[in-house]
Amino acid sequence: MKKTYRIEVDCANCANKMEAAAAKTPGVKSAVVNFMLQKLIVEFEEGQDMVAVMQQVAKNCRKASHDCEIYL
């Protein structure tokens, strides 16, 4: 299942770091950040708890780039 989240990130480099951190999170099949639209599109692996996975995604993204925000 794919879901789109609104994000806030200041630069394209930070958006790339955010995308990489989200994609490496267990339970995430793929993740794409659209810097211009300020959106994060996450495809979850089958049978995953989306809320729990997204909480971990948000945590991992903040570690990669401290100035990013995901609106869950």
Image (cartoon, rainbow, N blue to C red):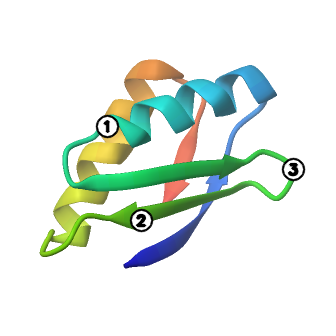
- What's the residue at 67%, 33% (across, down)? 15
Q: Residue 62's spot in the image, x, y percent?
A: 43, 30
Q: Nearer the viewer, residue 71 or 33?
A: 33
Q: Which mark is residue 59?
A: 1
- What's the residue at 49%, 51% (across, down)? 31
**Type of residue at label 2?**
Glu
Image marks 3 and 2: residues in contact by CB distance under 8 Å: no
Can the viewer see residue 11 in this picture? no
State the image quarter where residue 69 is shown: top right
Alpha-carbon distance for marks 1 and 3? 22 Å
Q: Nearer the viewer, residue 65 or 35?
A: 35
**Type of residue at label 1?**
Lys
Mark 1 or mark 2: name the one nearer the start of the chain: 2
Nearer to us of marks 1 and 2 is 2
Number of marks drawn: 3
Crowd rating for badge 2 (residues with CA inside 10 Å; few <14, some 14–19, many 20+): some
**SS at circle 1:** helix
Q: Is residue 66 above or below residue 49?
A: above
Q: Residue 2's spot in the image, x, y percent?
A: 45, 75
- What's the residue at 58%, 36% (across, down)? 68
Q: Residue 21's spot in the image, x, y percent?
A: 42, 31
**SS at circle 2:** strand
Q: Which residue is mark 2?
A: 43
**SS at circle 3:** loop
Crowd rating for badge 1 (residues with CA inside 10 Å; few <14, some 14–19, many 20+): some
State the image quarter where residue 60 is shown: top left
Say left or right for 34 vs 29: right
